[in-house]
């Protein structure tokens, strides 16, 4: 049983994490122009970069989902 697909419960958990990471990305992007401290701006910029990478990886994992493939 070497199936590379993701179970429905795992898909739901991935979706929850993806939603959270999207919220983090939105908040970091929204707050960046409002921040005057250079160190904090740097942290937010790094958070945006990391969040975008994580979102891409999560979407890639969700493509392996039984739910996602059955909806096509």
Image (tube, helix red, strand yellow):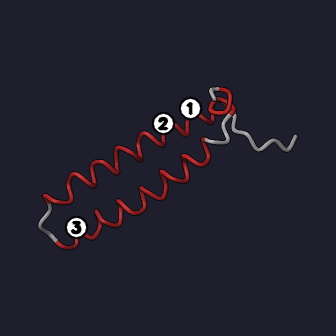
What is the x, y in percent for residue 56?
A: 51, 53
Residues under numbered marks 1 and 2 in contact, where contact means CB atoms less than 8 Å apart: yes
The spot of residue 51 in percent (x, y) is 41, 56
Q: For residue 65, what is the image quadrant?
A: top right
Crowd band around label 2 with a 10 angstrom C-alpha radius: few (<14), some (14–19), many (20+) = few
Is 35 situated above or below 55?
Answer: below
Residue indicated by mark 1: 12
4 lies left or right of 39? right
Identified at 27% across, 70% down, the residue is 42
**Which numbered circle lies on residue 41?**
3
Q: Which badge, 3 or 1, is on the more N-terminal residue?
A: 1
**Residue ID for mark 2:** 16
CB within 8 Å, label 3 to label 1: no
Q: CA distance from mark 3 to mark 1?
A: 33 Å
Q: Is residue 60 above or below residue 33?
A: above
Instruction: Kindly identify the residue that appears in the image at 39 percent across and 63 percent down.
Output: 49
Residue at horizontal 34 percent and vertical 43 percent from the top: 23
Disc number at residue 47? none
């Amino acid at each position: 049983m070497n199936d590379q697909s993701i179970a429905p419960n795992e898909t739901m958990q991935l979706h929850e994490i993806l939603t959270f990471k999207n919220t983090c990305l939105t908040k970091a992007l929204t707050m960046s122009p409002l921040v005057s401290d250079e160190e904090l701006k740097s942290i937010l910029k790094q958070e945006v970069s990391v969040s975008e990478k994580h979102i891409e990886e999560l979407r890639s994992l969700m493509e392996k989902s039984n739910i996602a493939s059955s909806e096509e």
